[in-house]
Image: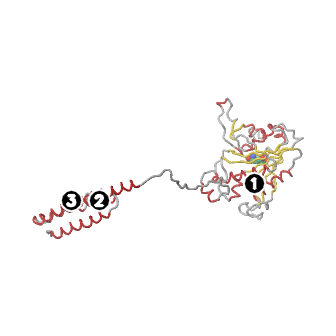
Amino acid sequence: MLESSNNMQDKIADIKNTYLKKIKQASSLKELDEHFLALFGKKGAVTKLPKEFSKLSKDQLQLVSPLFNGVKFELEKAISNKRLTIRETGYSLLERESLDLSSPVEIKKRQGALNPLTEFENHIVQVFSKLGFQQYDAPQIDTDINNFQVLNIPENHPARDLQDTFYIDSTNFGIEPGRILMRTHTSNSQIRIMTEYPAPVRFMNIGRCFRNESTDARHEHTFDQFELVYIDKGLSLANLLYLSEYFLKAVFGPEIKARLRPKYYPFVEPGAGVDGLCIFCSGKGCNICGGVGWLELGGAGMIHPNVLRAGGINPNEYSGIAWGCSPERMTMLKQGISDMRQLRNGDLRLFESLGSSVKV
Ligand code: DAH
């Protein structure tokens, strides 16, 4: 069936009006490109229309063709004109734009805070400084002798199983393998303190320790320890209990009580687990303290005569207290952190949520 030329003229007028309007309203080159494609692309309205011309008679075609060509030209022209206008507007905007490098810029404030572990450690250093304890810095890489042997843990002693660690390949320094290690505890400070300073002494040692552990919510291969070494004449378990209670009150508040429970550590005799009355249930028994009403918070004891002797101190003249705790465990209890790994994984969201009190 033949198409009427009126019909075709309408279609052409329709394309023209619709697109001239769109082109006029376009405000970006991207928009214009879209209109161009919609008209002149492979499936564009202008590209497709001539396919319908075969339905027209010759006379009709003579009428429609020039009209179509005219509209095609008009649309092309409208697009290229509008392109120029949009470009010009862009350039003039750029010309008007100015950059004053001397004008003040508002810098977003981002206030840092200390890691709660660092905060806790700073606090306990202060707490014991008040009792005359000085800080001692023992090395994190030490000999098997200082870390184990002089602490009454000879080679092949079963207590070594509790503290497997990482050994340094020392063959390059002419030292046979298995002699230099990453310290497993701050107790490596004990012998150094005794040999470097004459008794009586009061020292504290805080720092990194390492163990060959698989990590979980309560264990890390890299962790901190805090240790006191107190040597004087006539010290007894009473002094040890006092120190424990003094420490726990400073950390958890005046309500807490300390108790000593017999526990084996090779370098002390007697050795004690230092417990604090459970801060969550005040001793009633809850699921955090496992129903016992007490939480194990540290390890301590009277320094073993063998260790004193290894440090050149006469055990008949002096006695010593060694006292240690895990700053991580304390911080977790105090701040309600359930996974130890959060303390070192660098995720700031934890610290933000705690609203760490010390701002730096
Ligand atoms: N060094 C012990 C450990 O890593 C902790 C410890 C226990 C330290 C008893 C002490 C102590 O000073 O007396 O498990």
- Secondary structure state at the residue bearing disc 3: helix
Tell me which corner region of the image, top left, top right, bottom left or bottom right, holds residue 297: bottom right
- Residue type beneath disc 3: Phe
The disc at residue 179 is none
| Residue where numbered disc 1 is placed | 297
The disc at residue 73 is 3
Name the spot of residue 175 as percent of width and height, x first. Answer: 68, 31
- Secondary structure state at the residue bearing disc 1: strand
Q: Which of marks 2 and 3 is nearer the N terminus?
A: 3
- Secondary structure state at the residue bearing disc 2: helix
In this rendering, the count of numbered labels is 3
- Residue type beneath disc 1: Leu
Name the spot of residue 122 as percent of width and height, x first. Answer: 72, 51
Q: Is residue 216 above or below residue 13?
A: above
| Residue where numbered disc 2 is placed | 82
Q: Residue at point 23% right, 65% down? A: 16
Return the residue nearer the eye: 295 or 53: 53
